Image (cartoon, rainbow, N blue to C red):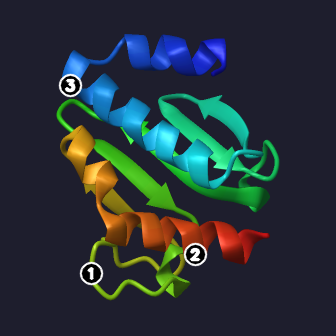
Amino acid sequence: MTPEVQALLARQSPAVAETAWRAVGLILELYPDAVVTVDGGDIGFGSGAGYKGLVFVVSPHTSWVTLGLANGAALPDPEGLLQGKGKVHRHVKLHSPADADRPALRAVMGEAVARRR
């Protein structure tokens, strides 16, 4: 992982860092050729360094990690995991590493990658 990602997550509490690393690992498992960028406190994953190719964003907060899905409003979400009311993007709040292990989340994320390719 990039030094910028490591530095960003090293500044988080152990619980938040572990949750963020689990999310990062899942993203890279599903999207191994993602270009990884750090912008402020956010880690972006996409087809390039800009917003146009963005697929996922991992944003650590004080007690949770937000996993953003670009174009998430268009994704099937039968279990209602995705939050947000914007016209395009959606997110999921991960409160523990186990939250990243949910099969429904993996399915939504896999669909996001498939649609981007």
Counting from the top left corner in percent of width and height, residue 53 is at 77, 58
Regarding mark 1 in the picture, which secondary structure is present there?
Answer: loop
Regarding mark 3 in the picture, which secondary structure is present there?
Answer: helix
Marks 1 and 3, the one that precedes in the sequence: 3
Q: CA distance from mark 2 to mark 1?
A: 15 Å
Residue 5 visible here: yes
Q: Residue at x 70, y 77 (%)?
A: 115
Q: Residue at x 72, y 54 (%)?
A: 51
Rendered view: 81 above or below 60: below
Instruction: Indicate left or right for 111 with 8 as reference.
Output: right
Image quadrant in which you'd find residue 70: bottom right
Query: What amino acid is at disc 3?
Result: Ala
Query: What amino acid is at disc 1?
Result: Gly
Regarding mark 2 in the picture, which secondary structure is present there?
Answer: helix
Q: Residue at x 32, y 24 (%)?
A: 17
Counting from the top left corner in percent of width and height, residue 21 is at 42, 30
Rendered view: 66 above or below 5: below
Image quadrant in which you'd find residue 4: top right
Marks 2 and 3, the one that precedes in the sequence: 3
- Dot 2 corresponds to which residue? 111
- Label disc, if present, on residue 80 of the rendered structure: 1
- Label disc, if present, on residue 15 of the rendered structure: 3
Marks 2 and 1, the one that precedes in the sequence: 1
Counting from the top left corner in percent of width and height, residue 16 is at 26, 28
